[in-house]
Image (cartoon, grey):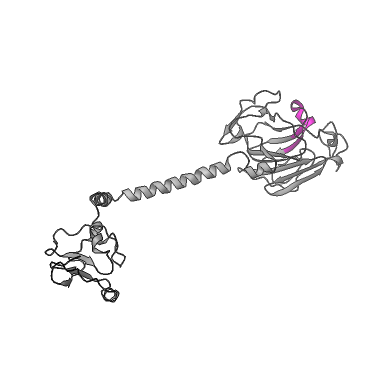
Amino acid sequence: MHSAQGRPAARQSSRDRSHSHGALMAFSESQTTALPRSTILPRVAFSRYGNGMGNRSLERPDPSVSPIGNRTITMAGYLPPPRCWERVGFPPRRRRALELWRNHPMKRPFRYGLACSLIAASFVCLAFALSAPGVLAEEKEKGWRPLFNGKDFSGWTDAAGKSPGKGWAIVEGAMVRQGPAGDIWTKDRFGNFVLDLEFKTEGNSGIFIRTGNPRDCVQTGIEIQVYKPVGAPSKHSCGAVYDALAPTKEMVKADAWNHVVITAKNNRLEVVMNGEKIIDMDLDRWTTPGQNPDGSKNKYHKALKDFPREGHIGFQDHGAKVSYRNVKIRSL
């Protein structure tokens, strides 16, 4: 910056700048005059760099206040060198952007709201993906595979090997018995395995395992009872090996999803419901047709130890609404 005589104006020393901290200086042709900050300095000019006190207002200067003579305004210790003064005033395009920003105060909140909505939607999609039927990559490495994909009845049939009855429907990723349909069966057969699933029931149903002949499931397969709470465990309550062994306690929850894990390995059968082991059975102890080891009667024509050790898995249609989801299996 030069004076009217062409002599370069002396630059402020660091000591001078320290004494003039926060002060406004006006440089004229003959002298330097301290001016009140709010008198002349256009707010939009110093807001680009700040005024040292956190003021970043984008308000326009008061049009009633005009510059004094040909003085140039700067702020000692804060604004850039005089050569940068033109940049402080902002180019027309940036001034236009600031004007739009000021005249449309809802723009930024709208953008922020949109961003928050997109983030929230991404979390919802992630949650849905995590809760959708199927198995994770790490589960696949451990041998798990889905038996029900939550979209259609691929891999499932009726007792005759045809398409499942129309009473079975898919609702929100679950297999739901909504009307007369008959039992539904896996096409594949399984011997030693861990079966993991969730169910919700309003009445009676059952999970058949190792069923040799789906058309004669009662006499060729083992049924894990699915039923609403009855208040006390029995050979017919939820989680029982039907008509053969009662669960140690009743763990089923009414009007809620129940998690059950069934492990079948050779002669051993284990049932865990909602985190509690309720069945630990040795099939080899059932040696007499129609009779349990405790002397009580059962309906089976053969001893349970002689039942097939491999077969189909099925869900029973016993006239009540029942839902199954997140059905997966791991062979042992």
Nearer to me, 42 or 206: 42
**Rendered view: 127 above or below 31:** above
The residue positioned farthest toward the right in the image shown: 288
Quarter occupied by residue 72: bottom left
- Tell me residue 184's x, y (percent): 67, 29
Residue 239 at least partly seen:
no
Quarter occupied by residue 204: top right
Residue 5 at least partly seen:
yes
**Rendered view: 186 above or below 259:** above
- Tell me residue 108's x, y (percent): 33, 50
- Tell me residue 275's x, y (percent): 68, 49
Nearer to me, 186 or 8: 8
Quadrant in the picture for the C terminus: top right
Residue 31 horizontal side relative to residue 143, left or right: left
Quadrant in the picture for the N terminus: bottom left
Number of numbered discs: 0
Residue 260 horizontal side relative to residue 21, left or right: right
Nearer to me, 33 or 128: 33
For image coordinates 25% across by 55% down, the residue present is 90
Residue 236 horizontal side relative to residue 6, left or right: right
**Rendered view: 28 above or below 247:** below
Nearer to me, 10 or 276: 10
Q: Is residue 222 magenta?
A: yes
Residue 142 horizontal side relative to residue 309, left or right: left
Q: Is residue 172 magenta?
A: no
Residues rendered magenta in the picture: 209-224
- Tell me residue 203's x, y (percent): 65, 37
